[in-house]
Amino acid sequence: MQLLRIKLENWRAVRSREITLGSGVNIVEGANEAGKSSFIEALNVIFRERDSTKKKEIKSITPKGNDVGSTVEVELQTGEYHFIYTKTYNKRAATSLSVLKPALAQYTGMQAHDEALRILDETIDLTLWQAIQLEQGSEFSEINLRQSTGLAKALDSAAGGSGVGEDDSALLAQAKAEYLRYHTEKTGRETGELAEVRLKCDSLRSEIETASTAMQNMQMQVDRSAAIAEELQEHNRSLPELKAALEVLQKKQVELESLRERNRTVRAEFDAQSLRVDEAQRQLSDRYTVREQLALQQQTLQALTDKHKTLVEDASQLSQKHTELHQNLEQGRERKAGLQKLVAELEAAMKQQADVQELSALENRLKQYNQSQKLLDQSVHEYQQYQIDNNTLDELQALQKNVRELEVRLDAQQPELTVTALQDSIFNDKPVVKDTVEPMDTSVEFEFRIGSSATITFKPATNLAGLRDELQAVKSQLSDRMGQYAVRDIGEAVAANRRRNELHQQIKGLKQRRDDLLDQQVELVQQRVEALRASVLPAGSLDVQDDLPEQLVSKRTELDEIEREVNRHMADQSSLQAGKAGIDAQLELLQRQIVDQQQAVSQQQQQLAQQLAKRSDDALTEKLQREKLSCQRLKVKLQDAEGALSQSQGDEISQQVDNARHAVDRATAQFHEDEKELAAVTAQLDTLRAEGLHEKLEHLHAELNDAQERLQQLTRAAGAAKYLWESLRKHQRATQLSYVKPLSELVCGMGRIVFGNDFQVNLNESLGIESRTLHGLTVPFDDLSGGAREQLGILLRLAATQLVAGVPLILDDTLGHTDAARLQTIGALLSTAGRQSQIVVMTCYPQRYRHVGDALQHRLVAESPVAG
Amino acid sequence: MTRHFLKGEAQARFTQDRIDVISDLAAMAHEHDARFMVICGDMFDANEVAPQTVLRATEKLAAFPVPVFILPGNHDPLNAASVYDSAAFAALPEHVRVLRDSHIHQVPGVPGVEVVAAPWHRKQVLSDLCAQMLEPLAPVKEGEIRIALAHGQVSSLATDHQHPATIDSAVVKQALQDGKIHYLALGDRHSVTDCDESGRIWYSGTPVATDFTENNPNQVLLVDASVGIDPRAQVQPLTVGDWQFEQLHATVDNVADIERLESKLADYQNKESVIVRLALTGALKLDDSAALHAMIDAKRGLFASLRLHDNQSDLTVLPESLDIDALSLSGYARSTWDELAQTAQGGGEAGVLATDTLELFYRLAHRQRQH
């Protein structure tokens, strides 16, 4: 296609303007707002929008303040066609098409619009044409080559014929539409009829389940009804039987009661007779008891009498023993008194001897004690004369030491002053002989004159006087203390102290020795000595016997034996006396018992005599026999009655009657329950029957069957649609990838001219630029500079026009970011591309395109403003 | 009775015809001077039929010109939910009787003719009800006629001889020989069947066809059980219903076969009452397959039902180069087609899916071509 002429009237700011274009590169130069963009806009609009459109962007092309129609007129050649196409928008909207070739034709209105489109559709790839237009300000990457069938064909051809036919896109669209009949586009979920039918199937299944459950319930009710009917039938049969059985048992029960009554009567008679037998038995037994008691009492009386006799004998023997024992006891007592006297005499002799010995010892020790006391007194006396104890000595020695120390200090500090007369002189008014040395006391202040020539005053140092005073004081104190203890010097003081300490030790030893002589106070010893002296027989009157202790021990032993013997006799005597008293007490008691027993025997004998007088033993025995016989007969009668009763199984019959009554009650109650339940089941069944469940269920099954068949068809169809859509897409993608290569190679070829030999470009499936590689560095398209993106955008468009001949490329004010070197190479490319396709460049910077070799230059001069 | 393959009006007509047939039978009874009619069980599909079905049926029965004896069968047994205990049946006139026991019933207005029956009281029985019915019967009096009614499978035809409910043919024959009955009218089997050489044990079939498996449906039996003339009962099948259940087997491999099938379908009379189930086998090209389905779709409206029986059909679609040539496919469409065709030839589930997909592909591409 070649644009020959474009004319605008009342198009935005353009009042009327026309440009005529040639083949190849056309550079349309014009200042800003000269109308360049309006030409491009008009070209886009005329082939896209009908004249009647009310779109906002079309409304906006009306000149400001001039409410007139906006007209665009395009003259062009495409294929074999040459036509002039005119459209006026907004006011007086109109369309006209004047076909000049291949045959003259004129169209207006919609017809003109449709015919123009038809011609373009037939001769060029409109999609590609619209895709490659690069308008001012548009994104360079916004290029959609994918939809271009012309480009696709060209790429198909370049890729070796694997591409797509014209119908393929439509086929793909149909396949997609078919896919979307059954699936959602985004998630692929089932949709449309397929989803509805699947839902319907689920719903029907649920309804069928409900109806089936109701049917099952109905069948259960039917079964239950049959079961109840059978139970009722069984009740009808069994209830009369149960009642008859109850009647039989009740009759047996009446008979049993009669037997029980008879049994009770016989038992009462038997019990009464038994009482009578017991009474006769008791009477006879009482008689025997009286006789036995009498015999027993007589036996007891005899026993008591025998025992009394024995006790009397025992008492006599005891008296005899007591007499013998008394004699023995008296003899023992006499012997004991003799021995006691002898022992006392021996003990007195023993004591006299001991007192004498003790007196002698005490007197001796007392004598030693007195001697020790005397020595002690002497030592104490001497000790008291020596008063310098250790503390006093320490004090004196300290004073002595102090004196010495003061003297030493005084000697050390006191100057020596001697006056030696060289000639006889008067000194201190005293004459001094030649060569006489006169020492001076330097401890005191003094003055001396040397004749009349001089007076010398000597003043001792102040501290020397203090020392001297202190020495004097200490010496005085020492002297006083010495005098106090009557010693002259410290040597005597030391000797006196030593003697005092020796005496102290001596006194201590004497006291110890004295105290060791006596173990108690001396006064008590002296009292004891006095007492012994008074009690001890005079010397010589004492017959000293050496075996006295042995005699005393022997006699004491003998005395102990006699005492034990006497004591034993005394104990025996007490025992005999106690035994005698016991026997006497028993005898007394026995005598009383014998008397009581004799009375009891007498009474019993009287009682028995009275009873025998009333009824003899034989009479009692005979009565008992009679009563027993009657009782025996009644017992037999009772056994018969009880036998009859036990045979009647009384307890069992009662239980059976109770059981039978309960069985009848229960069966009757169950019968009524069953009747009620049957009525309820029947009513329920009437209700269920009215629902027509069978047909309902059949309808549901039929519907479900239908729906399932439809679902199966739809599922297959959906599966096929999905498979087809996915297969077509898969192959389409594969083909698209194969397209990329020829276009990519073409862009790379052009790019190497512009960017250098190591230029590479990567296109994506949609034929857009993915990235550029230069100098080994790959950069995503979006990260490239504005200039690089613009240059690559132009290259891609140029490549597309090279592949699809006949599509004009219109560039609106591009290459604004391109440096001079690249302007040169791009200019060369444009020039080359212009030989194959028409290129229209709109620019206000024509110098950018001065490197385009073959180009027609057009200049748009600004026109005067449109009249308002 | 609902048939899932009957849609809309066809199902409605079928249902109505099954009720209207009572009127047809009444007319037929009048025409042939029948003295009474017996229905040998399963008059209803179930006890749980809709009340309107019962009402419509009983209305027709009430108008029946001769006495009608109805035997409850296994589908409509005399249980607690029995349809025969419904108000509609309670309101029927005296000449319509439900046989509730095995007592002997005199046919009203027909002296010397008795009916005795073995009704079902539950859906499943575990004894030979017929034998139990026959056992206590005394021989029919001289000059009288006794017709017995029973429901179930007779042992001479039954596949499950061991089933305790099977009607013992020997017992029936013996009863016929002993003069206890003169004719046994049987129900349950939907095909008219003569069960014994004596000609006195018959299944009357069904007056309206209900399934593809029935032999001689749409019939009733006109029975002349006169005694002393012929030991064999005179039994005459009479056609009453007009519904047809047809399973049509055909091989279709090419256009000619399709045309033959079309011709066969065209031959059916009263197509609106014909239910056709096609059992087709063969291998077709895609375009032929499309043609076959188009033909069936075109004819479907004529019939009560016309459908391909999937279980009985084995149709293979074979995409051929001719198919693809006709579509002039190229580019990725062509490569897609080739891949699908290859998968289809592999068979199996994937093959079936690929074949379905090819058919769709063909249809879409063909439509595209036509545009």
Image (cartoon, coloured by chain):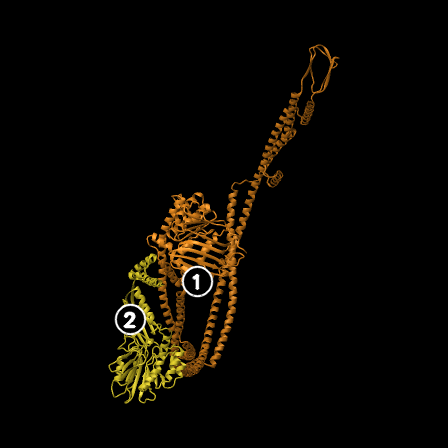
Residue type pointed to by label 2: Leu
Q: Quadrant of residue A699?
A: bottom left
How many residues crowd around disc 1 within 10 Å: few (fewer than 14), some, or many (20 or more)? some
* Residue A220 at x, y percent in the picture: 39, 74
Give the letter of the chain under mark 2.
Answer: B
In this view, the residue in front, B310 or A639, is B310
> At numbered mark 2, what does the secondary structure look like: helix, strand or loop?
helix
In this view, the residue in front, A615 or B292, is B292
* Residue B299 at x, y percent in the picture: 33, 72
How many residues crowd around disc 2 within 10 Å: few (fewer than 14), some, or many (20 or more)? many
Q: Is residue A115 visible?
A: yes
The colour of chain B is: yellow
Q: Quadrant of the N terminus of chain A?
A: bottom left
Q: How far is disc 2 from disc 1 in space, using C-alphas?
A: 51 Å
Q: Quadrant of the C terminus of chain A?
A: bottom right
Q: Quadrant of residue B122?
A: bottom left
* Residue B178 at x, y percent in the picture: 26, 85
Q: Which residue is mark 1?
A: A110
Residue type pointed to by label 1: Met
User: Looking at the image, is A133 positioned above or below residue A417?
Assistant: below
Residue B261 bears which disc, if any?
A: 2
The colour of chain A is: orange
* Residue A836 at x, y percent in the picture: 38, 50
In this view, the residue in front, A554 or A149, is A149
